[in-house]
């Protein structure tokens, strides 16, 4: 075992990990090292088994040293066929079709563990038809799916120069170029760098869209989110890299460079105590314009937090733009045909991206989802109350409160204030259960692993045994489960519920 460990150390230090086969897994360690190869399962005493073509025998690693294993290059063997799911009080999201519910249990058919019966008090939400449409993106799992642009490199930043001197893992963070976002684990990081670099995807945002992500920050928050962006810029005189007023470095909240980076678009700028929306584009002379879209309130709850779940809903057709933070409605803007200047919706494209405008700010972005939006004005969570269940229909307007009695044969029965109601489950978007009926959430313990699925979902438990195709895990809500990994994209061995964590290497 000692000789094999020496060989692996040499493999990592010489940079051979960059030579990837067509199908590959990636192990990321807590100290920042990473190793390509093949995940081969869990041993009888809990070790993670790893194989490489250049090492004769499988090698076993202690799970407490591993941060994550990315399976099959972040691309599942088989994606889950449906977006329906239920969410547990501990944060697990179990993808599958809910087929039954009574006073004691919720029954769900899954594509990875068969039929599960979960105690009702462990289930906070059931979402038979979430989002109301297709999912276009869920991640990040792969760094190469993203690109970066800078005010001085609008067609994309050049590759980073390769350092001739080998950098030790504990030194690596000091060597990172300050004008680039960093990808680590399943998240993007910005670490107190110089402003001006946007992390972008140039397509994938439909006319009616939900864009959600988990956001965390250190010290103070400053983040710009560009959406419905076309990244188109006017022609400039030969020899000029960008329009003359595009060199702004966002001093004092200056937003004149937003359209230079995102083109015709909208940009939300998040601060600790407020959020501002800008209508971005160019005038007839090619000069960038960033017009502040005013509304009655700008206050946000960020000043008391260091992380939040952000959800943006935008409808290019009707001009509605709504912001939710941690499931609660914050603010809405109305653009489009109803505007006084009749200029219409400013966002002309399907792209989106992130930018940190301030010189001294650090953020982490993870769990990004882009999906179609059915026009639903509220989320069931924003209506959740202590003593009543909330049922939100998929038509986007109707909602009911009361006691959910039963789900059987594709139908939901509910005892409401004005009588008993029955709904076909296919017409239900979300069910949020009353807080008083839920068990206290249990923290994920240090010996548990998160299995993340594509396009959504996660399940936590202690690995008992397994191979590269399936893991047997011990869960706190359903006992031992045999989990098929064909729809899994990541094994998270050291998940953190806290942002400021020593194991979060980029911070």
Image (spheres, grey):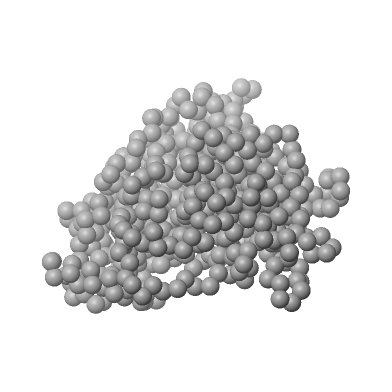
Residue at image coords 52%, 49%: 360
Looking at the rendering, which quadrant does residue 264 occupy? bottom right
Q: Residue at x 55, y 66 (%)?
A: 147
| Residue in the foreground of this view, choosing between 141 and 421 | 141
User: What number of labels is visible?
Assistant: 0
**Residue at x 62%, y 67% (from the top left corner):** 152
Indicate the quadrant containing the N terminus: top left, top right, bottom left or bottom right: bottom left
Image height check: is 433 above or below 241? above
Residue 386 screen position, x and y as percent: 51, 24
Q: Nearer the viewer, residue 46 or 286?
A: 286
In this rendering, position of residue 492 left or right of residue 311? left
Q: Residue at x 63, y 38 (%)?
A: 274
Judge from the rendering whether residue 452 lies leftward or rightward of residue 324; answer left or right: left
Residue 430 horizontal/vertical position (percent):
56, 40
Residue furthest to the left in view is 2
Q: Where residue 9 sits: x, y (%)? A: 23, 68
Q: Is residue 81 above or below residue 131?
A: below
Q: Is residue 386 left or right of residue 243?
A: left
């Amino acid at each position: 075992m000692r000789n094999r460990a020496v060989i692996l150390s040499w493999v990592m230090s010489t940079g051979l990990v960059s030579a990837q086969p067509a199908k590959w897994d990636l192990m990321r360690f807590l100290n920042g090292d990473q190793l390509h190869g093949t995940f081969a399962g869990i041993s009888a005493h809990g070790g993670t088994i790893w194989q490489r073509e250049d090492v004769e025998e499988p090698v076993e690693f202690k799970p407490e040293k591993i941060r994550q294993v990315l399976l099959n290059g972040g691309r599942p063997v088989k994606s889950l066929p449906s977006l329906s799911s239920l969410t547990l009080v501990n944060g697990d999201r179990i993808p599958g079709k809910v087929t039954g519910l009574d006073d004691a249990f919720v029954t769900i058919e899954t594509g990875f563990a068969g039929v599960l019966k979960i105690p009702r008090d462990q289930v906070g939400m059931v979402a038979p038809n979430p989002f109301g449409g297709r999912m276009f993106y869920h991640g990040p799992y792969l760094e190469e799916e993203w690109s970066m642009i800078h005010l001085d490199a609008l067609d994309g930043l050049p590759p980073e120069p390769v350092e001739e001197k080998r950098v030790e893992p504990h030194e690596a963070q000091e060597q990172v170029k300050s004008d680039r976002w960093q990808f680590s684990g399943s998240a993007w990081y910005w670490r107190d760098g110089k402003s001006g670099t946007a992390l972008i995807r140039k397509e994938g945002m439909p006319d009616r869209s939900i864009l959600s992500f988990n956001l965390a920050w250190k010290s103070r928050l400053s983040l710009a989110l560009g959406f419905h962006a076309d990244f188109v810029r006017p022609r400039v005189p030969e020899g000029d890299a960008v329009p003359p007023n595009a060199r702004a470095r966002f001093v004092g909240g200056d937003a004149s460079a937003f359209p230079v980076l995102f083109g015709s678009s909208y940009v939300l700028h998040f601060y600790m105590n407020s959020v501002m929306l800008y209508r971005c584009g160019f005038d007839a002379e090619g000069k960038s314009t960033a017009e502040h879209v005013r509304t009655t309130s700008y206050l946000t709850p960020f000043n008391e937090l260091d992380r939040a779940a952000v959800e943006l809903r935008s409808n290019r057709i009707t001009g509605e733009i709504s912001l939710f933070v941690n499931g609660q409605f914050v603010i809405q803007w109305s653009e489009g045909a109803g505007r006084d200047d009749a200029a219409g919706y400013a966002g002309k494209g399907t792209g989106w991206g992130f930018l940190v405008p301030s010189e001294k700010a650090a953020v982490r972005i993870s769990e990004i989802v882009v999906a179609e939006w059915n026009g639903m004005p509220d989320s069931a969570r924003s209506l959740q109350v202590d003593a009543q269940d909330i049922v939100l229909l998929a038509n986007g307007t109707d909602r009911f409160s009361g006691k959910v009695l039963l789900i059987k044969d594709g139908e939901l029965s509910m005892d409401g204030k004005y009588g008993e109601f029955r709904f076909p489950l296919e017409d239900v978007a979300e069910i949020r259960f009353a807080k008083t009926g839920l068990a206290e959430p249990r923290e994920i313990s240090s010996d548990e692993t998160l299995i993340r699925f594509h396009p959504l979902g996660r399940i936590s438990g202690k690995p008992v045994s397994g191979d590269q195709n399936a893991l047997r895990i011990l869960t706190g809500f359903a006992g031992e489960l045999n989990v098929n990994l064909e729809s899994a994209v990541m094994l998270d061995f050291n998940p953190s519920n806290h942002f400021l964590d020593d194991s979060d290497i980029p911070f």
